Amino acid sequence: MTAAIETAGLTKRYGRRVALSECTLSIPTGKVVGLVGPNGAGKTTLLHLAVGLLEPSAGSVKVLGHTPAEGPEQLGRVGFVAQNTPLYAAMSVTDHLRLGGWVNPTWDMALAEQRIQHLGLDPHQKAGTLSGGQRAQLALTLGIAKRPELLILDEPVASLDPLARREFLRALMAIAVEHGVSIVLSSHLVADLERVCDYLVVLVAPRVQVAGDIETLLAIHHRLSAPRRDGLRLPRDWEVIEKSDTERQSTLIVRHDEPIHDPAWTVEQLDLEDLVLAYMSRAAGSGAQTPTLVGAAR
Amino acid sequence: MIRLAWRQFRTEAMTGIGALVVVAVVLAVTGPHIVDVYRASPSQLTSTDHGLQIALMAALLVVPALVGIFFGAPLIARELESGTFRLIFTQGVTRARWLLVKLALVGLASSVLAGGLSLMVAWWANPINIENANRFSLALFGMFGIVPFGYALFAFALGASTGLLSRRTLPAMATTLVGYVAARLAVTFWVRPHFAAPLTNSFALTANSQFGFQGSPSGLQVVVQNPSIPNAWVLSTAVADRAGHAPTTAFLSKACPGVVGGAQRASVGKGAVGKGAFLGQMQQCFTAIAAKFHGVVTYQPASRYWSFQSYETALFVALALVLAGLSVWWVRKQLT
């Protein structure tokens, strides 16, 4: 099966600065994928590479099996909602829907109009006067009414208030279910993604830290705690993501594909936020540390 | 895509068409009246008539620059500034097609607007110009004929491409103005004279020739008034002997002892001298020069007007196409 996004050694440099380094990923289709990482982690760079707004400095990226933006057909298969949801401020909501029809051969006007009506947007209102939530919804409408196979959204909820945020994510989930479209969205907040995603990519500049099905990720990461003692020896096949010691106690976050039944340790289930934070702090603690743990789901 | 390009250009297009219609009405109303007055007695033209004439000439001069600044510069820069290029580059049209359609539509409109204005004013001014003005002259060559179409197309392409490179509308507007003026000046003074080798005519200096002296770094020069060659573009006029040499300073100070000393202060015309004695000396001096020297004029004859118009238009259209091609390449390969 063709991957939604497949990258190999994907690297993007801006002058000397490396925004994305050696990114190798295979994101399957049919998922709602969360791309999480702190601000400046290279999320936008990765997504722009995937929609053809940027060209790689090295490595390759294939989206639905093709080079991004290689032609009108490929452009039609991938919907994109850019950060801050750029729209033509002087054009009305209706104008934007017309625009969508003018530049997309596969445009579904009925779907677009129905969404606008459902959202209660005034079709004659200028995009420049819409609220942040309404702008995001209009941008999402543009993204989905072209009937893409893959919809990519860059920080779609970052500037929204909590209510608009919830409504937007709810709409996104409905779209994923109704249209069977693969979705990739980025955020710097795990909480946003937890609700809607079933696949996660953690990116900390400039590398991918971990990627995989959320269910699998949660199953293979464990929080272990035990009274602190010296000369601690751990099984070789445990990969320690994070280790923190207090005076009395050691806490580990460990990646291990099998359940852990070691009587020496108290084993707890991790939640997604802890898992992401563990990878982020590992990356922050050792910028040069190698890889990219990839493809837990493969 | 053409509908999107039109939707985005609609307001500017309407403004341009509106302005053109206003000018057309003014010209249609005033045209016949001015011609009548002019035929009867040019001195009866009022200051309003003259003002209108000057305003129209000024408009012809600046309109190509204006379309470059207001149609060209924002065309891409505005999309880059507002981030909407990320919206449009991820829709179902390729970047190249998006740009080509925009360039073609707005470029054509720019050209038609500036060229149309020129044709209208040409119709209005024609009765006057035929009798009164030389359309081949430096002042008028760029205002009439077909060159305004080429100028506007070039200014537009310059605006669009600088907007693309600078990514900001205002700096692009300023650069467009400077670049357009520079290109026009460069072509007018350095390129246009070489479209064809100029013709040279010799003419005898007569008692009626107005002449004077002019100081220059290489010494004193005799200057004579251009001979009248109808509707030709006179490039230069000089005084030379049979061997082609200009009068030397030594010759002049010998032939015109009383004149040359004062001449270096300013160019002296025949009518500008009050004192009888000085006038006599001038006359003597002039007779001495006329006996040995003749006038030489180099010029482009009136018959070359349309070929020069064609060359210059082709040059600016070619420059516009080069800029458009570079812009398309940049948008496809470099723009992120």
Image (cartoon, coloured by chain):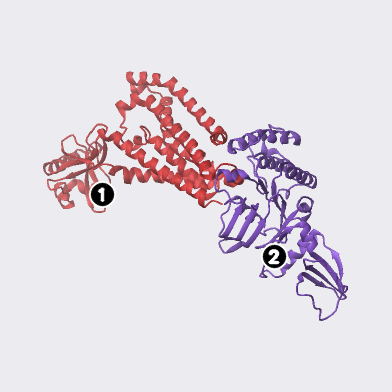
Q: Nearer the viewer, residue A136 or B311?
A: A136
Where is residue A183 drawn, in percent x and y?
70, 49
Point 47% across, 26% down: residue: B23
Judge left or right: residue A88 versus residue B199: right
Where is residue A189 drawn, in percent x and y?
76, 55
Residues at marks 1 and 2 on the same chain? no
Where is residue A282 drawn, in percent x and y?
73, 68
Q: Nearer the viewer, residue B54 or B332?
A: B332
Q: Nearer the viewer, residue B319 or A197?
A: A197
Count of marks, rendered view = 2
Residue A279 lies, with reference to residue B190, above or below; the image says: below
Point 38% across, 23% down: residue: B45
Q: Which quadrant holds residue A95? A: top right
Q: Chain of mark 2?
A: A
Regarding mark 1 in the picture, which secondary structure is present there?
A: strand
Q: Badge 2 is on which residue? A: A293
Q: What's the amino acid at mark 1?
A: Gly
Q: Badge 1 is on which residue? A: B215
Q: Which quadrant holds residue A127? A: top right
Q: Nearer the viewer, mark 1 or mark 2?
A: 2
Residue lying farthest to the front in this orientation = A1
Point 77% across, 69% down: residue: A242
Regarding mark 2 in the picture, which secondary structure is present there?
A: loop
Where is residue A292 drawn, in percent x and y?
68, 65
Q: Residues within 10 Å of mark 1 (few under 14, many from 20)?
A: some
**What letter labels the chain drawn in purple?**
A
Q: Chain of mark 1?
A: B
Quadrant (top left, top right, bottom left, bottom right) of the N terminus of chain B: top right
Q: Nearer the viewer, residue B54 or A159?
A: A159
The residues tagged by marks 1 and 2 sit, at their Cα atoms, a distance apart of 84 Å
**What letter labels the chain drawn in red?**
B
Q: Is residue A42 visible?
A: no
